[in-house]
Image (tube, rainbow, N blue to C red):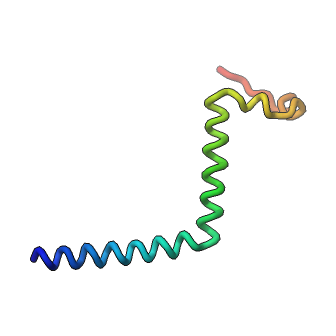
Amino acid sequence: MKYRDGFFATLALALTSLALAGVVTTDAYSQAAKAEATGVRALTEVAAGTTLASVEPALLAVAPVQVQ
């Protein structure tokens, strides 16, 4: 029983690694990684309070943000 569990665990690990390698090589993965990095950067800027400094003044005049 111990050897059977080890065999299936090894087989599952090999198949999972193969599937992950297949996903990483696709273009969809690179696009998703880029979108996530952009979102994290935007979230970091908002949390740091540096977002307003990089926004054009014309955009701020068109849509003011009201804090309640």
Residue at the top extreme of this rendering: 68
57 or 54: nearer the viewer: 54
Q: Position of residue 16 (x, y in %)?
A: 39, 73
Mark count: 0
Above or below, comparing residue 15 to residue 64 in the picture: below
Q: Where is residue 50 in the image (x, y as percent from the top left)?
A: 71, 29
Q: In which quarter of the image is the C terminus?
A: top right
Determine which quarter of the picture holds residue 63: top right
Which residue corresponds to the image point at 79% horizontal and 28% vertical from the top-left? Answer: 64
Which residue corresponds to the image point at 33% horizontal and 72% vertical from the top-left? Answer: 13
Which residue corresponds to the image point at 27% horizontal and 75% vertical from the top-left? Answer: 10
Above or below, comparing residue 62 to residue 11 in the picture: above
Q: Where is residue 35 in the image (x, y as percent from the top left)?
A: 65, 54
Which residue corresponds to the image point at 67% horizontal and 27% vertical from the top-left? Answer: 49
Above or below, comparing residue 5 to residue 61 in the picture: below
Above or below, comparing residue 34 to residue 23 in the picture: above
As drawn, is 7 to the left or to the right of 22?
left
As drawn, is 1 to the left or to the right of 26?
left
Q: Position of residue 44 (x, y in %)?
A: 62, 36
As drawn, is 3 to the left or to the right of 50?
left
Residue at the right extreme of this rendering: 58
Q: Quadrant of the N terminus?
A: bottom left
Residue at the left extreme of this rendering: 1
